[in-house]
Image: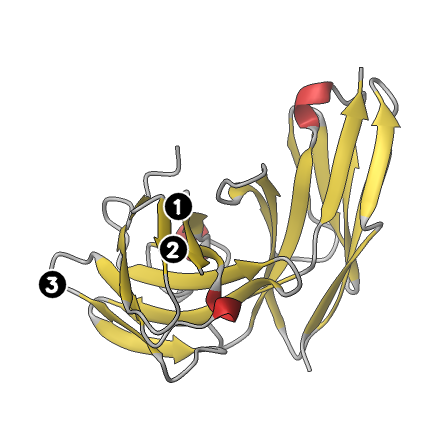
Amino acid sequence: DSGVTQTPKHLITATGQRVTLRCSPRSGDLSVYWYQQSLDQGLQFLIQYYNGEERAKGNILERFSAQQFPDLHSELNLSSLELGDSALYFCASSVEPGRRVHTRTDTQYFGPGTRLTVL
Amino acid sequence: EDQVTQSPEALRLQEGESSSLNCSYTVSGLRGLFWYRQDPGKGPEFLFTLYSAGEEKEKERLKATLTKKESFLHITAPKPEDSATYLCAVLIQGAQKLVFGQGTRLTINP
């Protein structure tokens, strides 16, 4: 158990709908990362938040958005869903985004994921 | 473009048959290289971090090594419970995201 929690475990919805995925980082971790894993793309970075602020963006679609709240949990919002959005969505957390050299503060620990199925 | 390539894509071994998985990378600047294990439908489980060429880390039957262009994950006398997909990822200097390889799917037959 990594200490990162994600809800829900499974989500089945229809095209055009909107869903919210939730993540709670490990105790003490300030950074939260979201990744998407599909069969053909592997694990792809979406977005990172550090202590409530957006720090980095990857291949995140405009239909997707995220935020990190004062209690450090994060939510990933996916809207106008398409069939191709079906994937596993993972949240990861780390202490801080690699400010120190050669320490474990930049190791990212992953949650169990949310499986999204768009029908 | 930053790229991580893992080989082989899949590997089937007999219990006790040692082997190595390869991760080669082309990046603008390496901050760290990470190995994860992933079971089907589960989240990646952290195994090792390597920061410098020549560095080695060991955990039970696994040993990870790093050179300037690649990393190896050596598995010694594997058991069926070592069956999983092993993912390699790099953290780029000045960036926050992990860039993952496609993984090696390892199957250990009893």
Query: Foreground: B63 or A12?
Result: A12
User: Position of B70 compared to B89: left or right?
Assistant: right
Q: Which residue is mark 3?
A: A70
Mark closer to the chain start, 1 or 2: 2
**Residue at point 70%, 58% (across, down):** B102
**Same-chain check, marks 1 and 2:** yes
Say if labels 3 and 2 share a chain: yes
The residue identified by callout 1 is: A111
Q: Chain of mark 2?
A: A
- Comes first in the chain, label 3 or label 1: 3
Which quarter of the rendered picture does the N terminus of chain A lie within? top left
The chain letter under disc 3 is: A
Chain for numbered disc 1: A
Label 3 Cα crowd, 10 Å radius (few <14 / some 14-19 / many 20+): few
Q: Secondary structure at mark 2?
A: strand
Looking at the rendered structure, the kind of residue marked 2 is Cys
Label number found at residue A91 = 2
Disc 1 packing (10 Å; few <14; some 14–19; many ≥20): many
Tell me the residue at 63%/65% (across/down).
Answer: A41
In this view, the residue farthest toward the left is: A70
The answer to whether residue A33 is visible is yes
* Location of residue B96 with respect to B61 vertically, above or below: below
Q: Is residue B90 above or below residue A61?
A: above
Q: How far from the left and from the top, in percent, is residue A58?
A: 47, 77
In the displayed structure image, the side of residue B49 where residue A62 appears, left or right: left
